[in-house]
Image (cartoon, grey):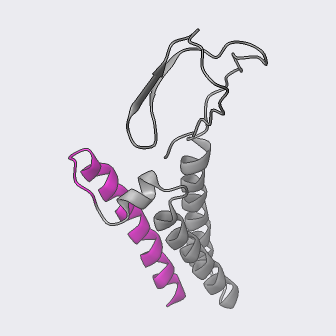
Amino acid sequence: MLILSSLLLVSGAIAVFALNVILSDQGRLVVGYQDMVRGGVPYVLLVPLTLGLALSLFGFVRRRSRFRGAVAVLEGAILAFFVFLFTGMTALPDHRLTVAVGDAFPGYSLPDQNGVIRAVAAHERRAPAIYIFYRGDW
């Protein structure tokens, strides 16, 4: 029963991911899409995958068999893939800081948190400010 439950959790999470990938290209949303794409961490996928792996490992410890071990290894590999996909693949590329202390801040044109475009010329005089560059979302 534990192995079946773990397989259902993992296959359900994969199905939600696959549906979101397929349907997001068509402009439709599926349950959990906003959490998966816009959230800080896609818990909609990672929680069921982790629970599924935990159940399969518990089932393997209770009654050892090759099948239960294979299921646990497969689910661990699937979880590792999704963790890598959502963390490793979203890392920013290598870059260097182009503004040194004391340099003039370059001009920009960017939307603020309300969607209003804020533009400043490169050498425009302005009051001191703190600039926070939010990485963005998934």
Position of residue 115 relative to residue 53, above or below, is above
User: Does the magenta run of residues contain 14?
Assistant: yes
Q: From the viewer's perspective, is 98 left or right of 117?
A: right
Which residue is nearer to you in this view: 83 or 98?
Answer: 98
Residue at the far top: name it. 123
**Residue drawn at x 54%, y 70% as measured from the top left:** 47
Q: Which residues are magenta?
A: 1-29
Q: Is residue 83 above or below residue 116?
A: below
Q: Is residue 103 magenta?
A: no
Q: Position of residue 97 (x, y in %)?
A: 71, 21
- Numbered circles on residues, count: 0
Q: Position of residue 19 (x, y in %)?
A: 30, 58
Q: Please identify the dominant SS of the magenta region.
A: helix
- Give x and y (percent) for residue 41: 55, 58
Q: Residue at x 78, y 15 (%)?
A: 102
Q: Residue at x 65, y 89 (%)?
A: 63
**Quarter residue 101 falls in:** top right
Q: Nearer the viewer, residue 38 or 46?
A: 38
Find residue 96 and report its horizontal and vertical position in percent: 71, 20
Give the quarter of the image for residue 110: top left
Decide: is 105 above or below 111.
above
